[in-house]
Amino acid sequence: MHLFGRHPIASSILALVLAESSLGAASAAAQNPASQTQSPGSSKPTRHDSVEVVAKLSPEEVEEGKLNDAYQPIAEQQRKGTCSPAIIERYKSEVIPLAEKSAFSMPKNKFLFLANRDIGNCYLAQQDFAEAEACFQRILQYAPVWPGTDDSAYPINFRQIATAQMGQQQWRAAEESLQKSVSLFAPQIERAMKSDSEFSRTGHAGNLRGSKAISMAYLGIVYLREGRTADALRTVDSSFAEASQPNVPSTIISNVVQIGRSVAQATGDKNAIAKWSQRN
């Protein structure tokens, strides 16, 4: 199903959305890799670690290590190339059943979150939007436990839901999902800016602003599709203003500009087209 039909501008917007969606998911995965989110001192020992060290692990830590051993080889394979039915099937047969049987809430929800996120991203890449949405919707029951609703993965997941809904031309539902995404980023940015950590005030805040800007740009696309031209142009302008804040990655600004230019072209507004042509 085509996001905007067969118009060349529409097709380019769809391509941008899917490409950015994959980029955003990869960014979230980099920020929340399964092997790097364990609390200090709880890392699973490598094979050459002594029996004495292994004995100090709690049963929950042992369980997390077992789930991580099942998850990581599949995730690594996915990151190395395009998604395949075989990868999806491995998540479904090797990771999800194991996680569902876990007696410990944290590792159980963590690996159900990660597996469903990765499967959803595979389905997005394959443009199987209904299956992708089902995965991202399912994640909402795991996220409060891991990684937490104050993590950037939470509003990103609402954007992934919206992407899948856009692919199905469910514009009103996508609008609501994107508004939720944007609203969730706001307090996260505020907390980062007030942090005692310089990295939080700079790099982390910049990443959050950039991700919020992408959600806003998507919202502009939805407004355009709903026939709300003025709202579409206003929203992509706001997206550009957010992306232009300090420490936002240049790749984000580039993607926002591409979306903004496509929206302006689709509206036919000469002033907007001229304005966006000068942005970089």
Image: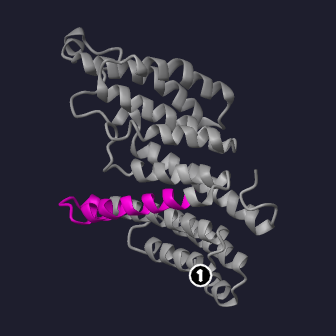
Give the number of marks.
1
Find the residue positioned furthest to the bottom.
Answer: 271
Q: Indicate the amino acid at tag 1.
A: Ala
What x and y, as percent, mark residue 259? 62, 69
Magenta-highlighted residues = 174-203
Q: Which residue is mark 1?
A: 230
How would you rate the neighbour count of disc 1 (Cα within 10 Å): few for under 14, some for 14-19, many for 20 or more?
Answer: few
The quadrant of the image that shows the C terminus is bottom right
State the image quarter where residue 271 is shown: bottom right
Residue at the top extreme, as displayed: 51
Q: Residue at x 40, y 48 (%)?
A: 154
Q: Position of residue 163 (x, y in %)?
A: 59, 53
Above or below, comparing residue 68 to residue 269 in the picture: above
Query: Looking at this view, is 141 or 9 the one in front?
Result: 141
Which residue sits at x=58%, y=56%? 20
Q: Looking at the image, which is closer to me, 191 or 203? A: 191
In the rendered view, tell whether residue 66 sits above or below residue 228.
Answer: above
Q: Could you say which quadrant of the image residue 207 lies in?
A: bottom left
- In the depicted structure, whether residue 160 falls above or below residue 99: below
In this picture, residue 14 sits left or right of residue 211: right
Queried whether the magenta region covers residue 194, the answer comes back as yes
- Camera-nearest residue between 236 and 30: 236
Residue at 65 percent across and 44 percent down: it is: 129
Residue 63: % across, % down = 32, 18
Q: Residue at x 51, y 34 (%)?
A: 116
Q: Secondary structure at mark 1?
A: helix
Q: To which quarter of the image does residue 260 belong? A: bottom right
Q: Is residue 36 shown left or right of residue 223?
A: left
